[in-house]
Amino acid sequence: MRILATTDLHAQLVPWDFYADRSIPGRGLSCLAIEIAKARAEAGGALLFDNGDFLTGNPLADEAVDHAGAGMANPMVRAMNHLRYDAVGLGNHEFSRGLDYLAHCLAEARFPVVAANIRRADGGPAYLPHVMITAEVTDTFGARHGLRVAVTSALPPQTMIWEKYHLSGRLQIGDILAALRVQVRQMRAAGADLVVVLAHSGVAPEGGGSTRMRANVAQAVAGLAGVDVVVAGHTHDALPAQPVAAQTGAALVLPGALASHLGVVDLDMGLTRGRWRVLGHRCELRAVAPVEPGQTAPEDAYLVSLGSPALARIRRQLDTVVGRAQVRLDTHFALIGRSRALHFVGRAVRDHMAGVLGAGGADLPVLAAVAATRTGGRGGAANYALIPPGPVRERDLGSIMPFDDRLAATEICGVGVMRWLDHAAAIFRQVAPGAQDAPLVDPEVPGFLFDAIEGLSYRIDLSMPPGPGRVRDLEWQGRAVRATDRFILATSSHRMGGGGGFPLPSARREIALPPTRLRDILREAARQPIGAQQALCPVWSFCPMPGTSVVLDTAAEAISDLDDLVSLGSAPGGFQRFRLHL
């Protein structure tokens, strides 16, 4: 029995980076479709599932929202119909455009949508809690059998916070494990031979206490009695790194993101006393087939026909000039505190907040937490923003603000600010004094989980382990920040909803704001020339460590004119390596 799975497609229908305006090898459902066809042919058939976050994530998805009013079917749903998905779970981002839009998209689906932990406000199920599929399989003697495969799904309960603007008063999203325990019992009682869970949930580090109401509990799901296969997601990891075979326990795959990988689970089934049992399994990920430089990967012709007209329209729209930059803006050195692009974002948000709050908010200083998006890492050597001096186009705004979240703000005290920054600093490894060329960044922590807070100055002590006490010399306008000082912290709706696990004040007072997209704020700010105010004056820096150096891998086109930052040449994966003297 073969199970195939995708997750976190984020509307990556074709292998194109809309913001960089170039192809992205190794991505795109049109390319992964070739691997799906191969995997099906090898097994003489298979079941294909998706684990959510397929509807939103790029300008193709944004255009689909605009066209929904004209009754046009969603291109991702049409693509999944074409590929004959057998069942699909929902991710948190399915709700980012509202319930009415989600209903419009799913009305065209020729596959069942399942969700165990989503209920209507009146307590009834919002979607099918599970579905039973009969899969025709052939045994080693050539006989045909019908296996009853039960499929359910669950997504993070934090979705109620992340998407409260759309969900409050309409849906309830409960604990993942509690909901799945109920569904697994019901599916087994209904005669399921095989139980598959689509868990839009990542693999969390070992330990960490209770799993109740946690977002990333895929390992705990795999440990539930009666579960045979778990498709994990949400975190964009790719697991397992190498094929894994086992005779016991549930199979688990986490097939990357943006159609980078296909999860393949092969199950050996045995019929004992009239009941089917799993005798062993093998899990692997299959990446989009690599190609030589200058060549293109094979693609599914129908999916290309779906994406190509939209791609041409979107490229024209993203070419619209919205402003002008007098200096180079990039994220190449955002993880060492040297990024005019992020400084531009922080200044734009603070200026917007000052205008919104007016005199009523003048008694509290306004800060802006800015995430270091597009800083390489899992996204590869092309995952950086670069806006050269000259016209600023619509695509440039998307490159430095790829997640078009809403603006949110809360009051926060000095202790809360310190905790926020200590949490952000977990991206950096501990560095021993005197170490030479020590790796700076923990590769297990994605760059978008790092925030800098515009409006303050501070230092990060790399000699300390990740955790409390790493941030030093925290100042506002040259004065040390006290524990009881009060600020207004502007951030994204995702952060305010718990995204990234940042320590929000338990008794926080959120600031009521008009619904405003962060990218709209940048568009307004770009009407003024982006120049002198973006002078490279770091908000934060590392504490001096004489005789110590670290290395950072960044974009191949990165340029440094800083004395303490020296290029060491190319690094694996297409990166360029720099040495920073601390």
Image (cartoon, rainbow, N blue to C red):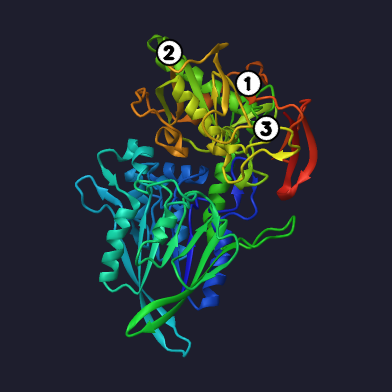
Does the rendering let one see residue 554?
no
What residue is disc 1 on? 530
Structural distance between the alpha carbons of marks 3 and 2 = 31 Å
Q: Counting residues from the N terminus, which is met first, the one under dot 3 or under dot 2?
A: 3
Question: Above or below — where is 505 with respect to 19?
Answer: above
- Residue 563 in the image, given as x and y percentages of width and height: 79, 25
- Residue 68 in the image, given as x and y percentages of width and height: 39, 46
Does the rendering let one see residue 260?
yes
Task: Please tell me whether mark 2 sits on a helix, a strand or a loop.
Answer: loop
Q: Quadrant of residue 551?
A: top right
Checking the image for residue 262, the label placed there is none
Q: Counting residues from the N terminus, which is met first, the one under dot 2 or under dot 1?
A: 2
Identify which amino acid the numbered label 3 is placed on. Answer: Phe
Q: Quadrant of residue 436?
A: top right
Q: Counting residues from the N terminus, which is met first, the one under dot 1 or under dot 3?
A: 3
- Residue 93 in the image, given as x and y percentages of width and height: 42, 45
- Residue 138 in the image, given as x and y percentages of width and height: 45, 84
**Which of labels 2 and 1 is toward the front?**
2
Give whichever of 368, 388 is nearer the camera. 368
Q: Residues within 10 Å of mark 2 (few under 14, many from 20)?
A: few
Identify which amino acid the numbered label 2 is placed on. Answer: Leu
What residue is disc 3 on? 333
Give whichever of 83, 274 is nearer the camera. 274
Structural distance between the alpha carbons of marks 2 and 1 = 27 Å
What residue is disc 2 on? 364
Which residue lies most toward the left here? Answer: 122
Give whichever of 555, 298 is nearer the camera. 555
Which residue shows up at 38% across the image and 46% down it? 214
Structural distance between the alpha carbons of marks 1 and 3 = 19 Å
Identify which amino acid the numbered label 1 is placed on. Answer: Ile
Question: Above or below — where is 190 with respect to 405?
Answer: below
